[in-house]
Image (tube, rainbow, N blue to C red):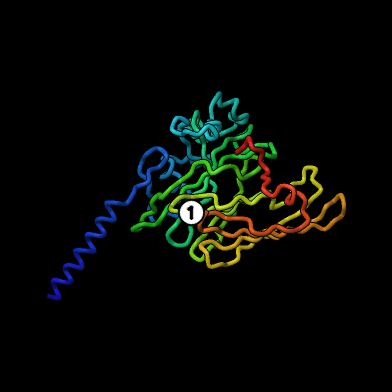
């Protein structure tokens, strides 16, 4: 009787595993292909190649056919035209680099930014669609409020393999001068949650929800902008543990108004609302006018969203 019971339990476990395997949704990459990476992989280029289907190491980018992307904000970055006009230093490049540029001609380049290993079983790949300005070594541009489009792909470790669980090629624009700066390491933002932050005049907080990379919060006016604004300030960002899924986020800003000599200070606190599934501003007090007058102001003009 005992043997029969053990066999029945084993059969049930095997059946459950087979059922889970059968019903596991395989997320395809942007080209509709399989996307998995060996569990031992640690380099971003391995994830980029699996996700985009290609990776041009000398350029640090992958590329997609613009016709495979239904997003005008991404299509505008198509690297098209006479290549000697696109890159003024074209004749100075070695043949290997020239060949890689030729391979991405008339395609959208996506530059690798970082690969984040979140805990032991989740990974976040960050990249940005964009272009070069004038010369091959200048990824980005000169416009203060110009920015590239940030994208991310989420992976989960499953049976020794990193499998794609979701992605978004265009989470928005979070940098300036056409460069998206991200922190080097992930940060703990909940008891069992990790996230990534951008680092600019405003900041973005990114994480994974239901297997998909998402913008958890846009944090405007983390630093003073300069450019004629007399309010010069910096901020300290702290996550305070709570019982909820995500910690409270607190920002303490301080600085000086160079017109009035007034010392500046401000405090803001956001709390995660489980019902609305988003962060909500709970407190904002201080004397920084740029925050008080327009607390949601983002550096980038609306046309760049």
Q: Secondary structure at mark 1?
A: strand
Q: Using the image, determine if residue 153 lies above or below residue 141.
A: below
For the N terminus, the image quarter is: bottom left
Find the residue positioned furthest to the top. 82
Check disc 1 and report the residue beneath it. Answer: 208
Q: Can you see residue 139? A: no
Q: Residue at x 63, y 56 (%)?
A: 281
* Percent position of residue 40, x then y: 40, 57
- In this view of the protein, which residue sits in the foreground, 188 or 55? 188
Q: Residue at x 25, y 55 (%)?
A: 19
* Percent position of residue 292, x then y: 74, 51
* Percent position of residue 99, x then y: 49, 32
Find the residue positioned furthest to the bottom. 2
Query: To which quarter of the image does residue 301 belong?
Result: top right
Q: Residue at x 53, y 32 (%)?
A: 72
Q: Residues within 10 Å of mark 1 (few under 14, many from 20)?
A: many
Q: Can you see residue 268? A: yes
Q: Is residue 282 left or right of residue 259?
A: left
Find the residue positioned furthest to the right. 260
* Percent position of residue 23, x then y: 29, 51
Query: To which quarter of the image does residue 77 belong?
Result: top right
Tally of numbered tags: 1
For the C terminus, the image quarter is: top right
Q: Using the image, determine if residue 304 lies above or below residue 115.
A: above
Q: Using the image, determine if residue 171 lies above or below residue 134.
A: below
- In this view of the protein, which residue sits in the foreground, 39 or 168? 168
Q: Residue at x 56, y 26 (%)?
A: 83
């Amino acid at each position: 009787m005992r043997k029969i019971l053990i066999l029945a339990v084993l059969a049930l476990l095997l059946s459950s595993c087979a059922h889970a395997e059968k019903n596991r949704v395989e997320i395809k990459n942007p080209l509709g292909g399989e996307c998995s990476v060996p569990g031992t992989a640690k380099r971003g280029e391995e994830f980029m190649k699996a996700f985009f289907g290609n990776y041009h190491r000398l350029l640090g980018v992958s590329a997609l056919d613009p016709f495979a992307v239904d997003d005008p904000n991404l299509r505008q970055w198509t690297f098209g035209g006479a290549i000697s006009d696109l890159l003024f230093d074209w004749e100075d490049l070695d043949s290997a680099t020239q060949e890689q540029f030729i391979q991405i001609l008339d395609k959208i380049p996506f530059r690798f930014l970082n690969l984040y290993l979140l805990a032991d079983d989740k990974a976040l790949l960050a990249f940005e669609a964009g272009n070069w300005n004038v010369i091959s070594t200048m990824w980005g541009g000169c416009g203060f409020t110009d920015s590239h489009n940030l994208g991310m792909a989420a992976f989960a470790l499953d049976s020794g393999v990193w499998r794609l669980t979701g992605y978004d090629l265009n989470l928005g624009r979070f940098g300036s001068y056409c460069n998206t700066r991200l922190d080097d390491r992930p940060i703990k933002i909940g008891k069992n949650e990790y996230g990534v932050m951008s680092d600019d005049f405003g900041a973005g907080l990114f994480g994974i929800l239901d297997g998909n990379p998402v913008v958890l919060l846009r944090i405007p006016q983390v630093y003073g902008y300069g450019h004629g604004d007399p309010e010069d300030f910096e901020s300290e960002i702290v996550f305070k543990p709570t019982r909820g899924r995500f910690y409270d986020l607190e920002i303490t800003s301080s600085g000086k108004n160079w017109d009035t000599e007034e010392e500046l200070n401000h405090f803001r606190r956001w709390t995660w609302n489980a019902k609305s599934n988003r962060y909500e501003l709970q407190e904002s007090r201080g004397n920084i006018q740029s925050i008080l007058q327009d607390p949601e102001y983002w550096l980038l003009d609306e046309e760049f969203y």
